[in-house]
């Protein structure tokens, strides 16, 4: 059995011995369901729901009409009571024989009722003290007119419109919360006992009642005692239906429903339009982002909507973010390639020295090879340290919180620390410290100190013995400008931008190769740009008049940061 077979058998045995792995499928992360694949956008549903809630306030007018209808009924009932009291008083005064009368003069009462009730739609009925019906205004020919009503033909079925209208009326009756009242029934031989309000009036107490008629309207009735010097001679009942009130309220309810239906249609159309202008672009962005995530290469791009609103801003921001992500991927690829290239040089030198060391017995050659190996090890250690610092820089800048700091005080501290360096020798560092609190910026103190220390180290290493390094800090509008100048050989032609590239190094001639990794200025530029600043390099002119034919007499680094 081969080695692969042995490994497989061992793995199977280990899995068999593990009780937690018995008959358990491998854990596969669940793929999140894409919400934008739904046929109806949840965002559109929310927009429609909000608009429909506002529309419900219009439909709520139906409930207001219910209260309005009840107020009209109460007012009509009050009017009936007043009319009953007036009629009863008129009959008690004019339709009796005198103060000692114990009965009502029916002809006079009939005449009074015909005159006062005939022109109106109110029905008045006069009952005697024994409960018999004496006068009914319905049978008085006061108006001398005949009312004709057109009856539907026998056997005719209702049309669809009428059926729908009946169903709508039933629904509105349910919504209107009509009062539960007894059904009105009129006997052919009416007596006072048929009406509880008449019995109450005959006992001397006025009363009123509400009953339901066939077809929906209500019948309102009020009874008042007919008295003569507090002697009850009879009872007068006046009644009226609420068909006119029902007609008014029902027409208003229908109108509200029509307006609500039109508003609903307009709301749905506007909601669909509004949702399409919001949900559809967001869905397109989500789908495009999914294509970018699953795509290979860079042919996939997020759409950029030319809209002057938040959706347009979102599309531009997401598109720019995607481009920045691609640039970051390029930077990571380039950094990885540069790291591999830089590590290969000392590794190749180490391998060559190690191979040569094993093939020679000469002490002097072995000593030189050991020195080369030690130097390459130090170079690898320095490279790995700088690469580790560069790789952690983005995370540190993202996690750390920038705070106000005095840049002048920071520069002064670093200048004092570098003046005591052993390699500074006879070199002079000049810096006029500004007043405390006048050069404030917002940033990370440790990272800005790293930039200033790197610029000082470069200036010290390039300046000759007896040279002067000048630092100055000044205000330039809304920014602070830090200048670091040395008296070294200056920058080679075309190197002003290249020196900020990773692993690019221009070192003075006496310095040994590989002493620096070439990451210092690249890290400094990254830190400065993270603080919304700029860093640049140029050569100083040897003569004060700016003669370009004179060779440069040093390099100048300028760091510009926004001030507080």
Image (cartoon, rainbow, N blue to C red):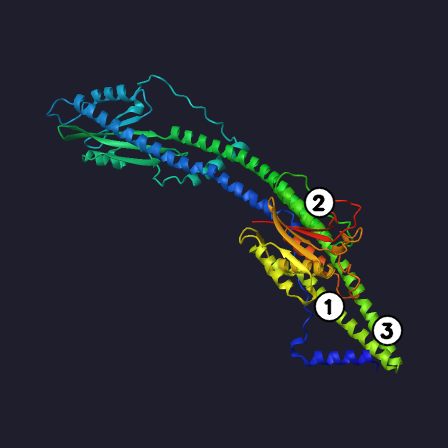
Report how far apart the C-alphas of labels 1 and 2 lie in the structure.
45 Å
Crowding at label 1, few (<14), some or many (≥20) Cα neighbours within 10 Å? some
Q: Quick one: label 3 or label 2, which is nearer the N terminus?
A: 2
Left or right: residue 406 versus residue 175 is right
Taking the view exactly as shown, the residue that stands out farthest to the left is 100
Q: Where is residue 144 drawn, in percent x and y?
A: 33, 16
In-front residue for pair 538/247: 538
Foreground mark, 1 or 2, reads 1
- Position above or below: 235 against 485: above
For the N terminus, the image quarter is bottom right
Q: Where is residue 389 drawn, in percent x and y?
A: 68, 64
**Residue at mark 1:** 382
In-front residue for pair 211/297: 297
Q: Quick one: label 1 or label 2, which is nearer the N terminus?
A: 2
Foreground mark, 3 or 2, reads 3
Left or right: residue 400 versus residue 352 is left
Question: Could one spot residue 444 in this view of the protein?
Answer: no
Residue depicted at x 56% and y 37%: 267
Left or right: residue 97 versus residue 313 is left
- Position above or below: 287 against 67: below
Q: Helix, strand or loop at disc 3?
A: helix
Q: Helix, strand or loop at disc 2?
A: loop
Residue depicted at x 44% and y 36%: 61
Crowding at label 2, few (<14), some or many (≥20) Cα neighbours within 10 Å? some
Report how far apart the C-alphas of labels 1 and 3 lie in the structure.
20 Å
Image quarter of residue 344: bottom right
**Residue at mark 3:** 352
């Amino acid at each position: 059995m081969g080695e692969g077979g042995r490994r497989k058998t061992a793995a199977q045995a280990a899995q068999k011995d593990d009780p937690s792995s018995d008959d358990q499928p491998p854990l596969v992360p669940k793929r999140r369901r894409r919400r934008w694949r739904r046929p109806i956008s949840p965002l559109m549903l929310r927009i429609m729901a909000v608009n429909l809630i506002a529309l419900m306030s219009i439909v709520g007018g139906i409930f207001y009409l219910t209260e309005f209808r009840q107020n009209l009924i109460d007012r009509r009932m009050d009017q009936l009571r007043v009319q009953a009291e007036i009629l009863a008083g008129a009959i008690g005064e004019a339709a009796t024989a005198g103060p000692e009368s114990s009965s009502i003069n029916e002809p006079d009462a009939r005449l009074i009722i015909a005159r006062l009730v005939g022109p109106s739609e109110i029905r008045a009925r006069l009952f005697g003290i024994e409960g018999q019906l004496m006068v009914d205004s319905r049978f008085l020919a006061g108006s001398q007119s005949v009312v004709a009503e057109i009856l539907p033909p026998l056997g005719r079925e209702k049309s669809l419109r009428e059926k729908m209208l009946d169903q709508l009326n039933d629904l509105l009756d349910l919504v209107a919360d009509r009062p539960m009242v007894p059904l009105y029934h009129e006997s052919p031989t009416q007596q006072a006992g048929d009406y509880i309000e008449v019995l109450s009036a005959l006992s001397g107490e006025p009363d009123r009642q509400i009953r339901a008629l066939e077809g929906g309207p209500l019948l309102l009735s009020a009874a008042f005692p007919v008295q003569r010097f507090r002697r009850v001679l009879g009872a007068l009942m006046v009644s009226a239906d609420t068909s006119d009130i029902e007609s008014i309220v029902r027409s208003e309810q229908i109108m509200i429903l029509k307006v609500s239906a039109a508003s609903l249609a307009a709301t749905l159309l506007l909601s669909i339009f509004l949702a399409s202008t919001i949900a559809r672009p967001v869905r397109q962005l989500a789908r495009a982002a999914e294509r970018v995530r699953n795509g290979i290469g860079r042919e996939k791009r997020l759409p950029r909507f030319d809209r002057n609103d938040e959706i347009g801003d979102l599309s531009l921001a997401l598109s720019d973010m995607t481009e920045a992500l691609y640039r970051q991927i390029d930077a990571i690829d380039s950094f990885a390639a540069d790291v591999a290239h830089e590590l290969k040089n000392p590794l190749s030198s180490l391998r060559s020295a190690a191979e040569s060391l094993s093939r020679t017995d000469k002490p002097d050659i072995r000593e030189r090879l050991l020195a080369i190996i030690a130097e390459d090890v130090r170079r690898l250690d320095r490279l790995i340290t700088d690469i580790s610092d560069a790789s952690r820089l983005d995370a540190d800048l993202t996690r750390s919180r920038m705070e106000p700091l005095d840049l002048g005080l920071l520069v002064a501290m670093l200048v004092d620390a570098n003046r005591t360096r052993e390699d500074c020798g006879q070199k002079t560092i000049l810096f006029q410290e500004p007043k405390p609190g006048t050069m404030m910026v917002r940033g990370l103190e440790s990272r800005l100190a790293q930039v200033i220390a790197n610029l000082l180290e470069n200036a010290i290493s390039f300046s000759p013995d007896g040279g002067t390094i000048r630092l100055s800090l000044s205000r330039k509008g809304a920014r602070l400008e830090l200048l670091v100048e040395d008296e070294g050989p200056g920058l080679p032609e075309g190197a002003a931008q290249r020196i900020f590239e990773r692993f690019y190094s221009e070192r003075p001639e006496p310095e040994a190769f590989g002493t620096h990794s070439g990451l210092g200025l690249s890290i400094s530029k990254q830190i400065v740009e993270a603080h919304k600043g700029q860093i640049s390099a140029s050569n100083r002119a040897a003569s004060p008049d700016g003669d370009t034919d004179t060779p440069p007499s040093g390099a100048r680094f300028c760091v510009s940061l926004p001030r507080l």
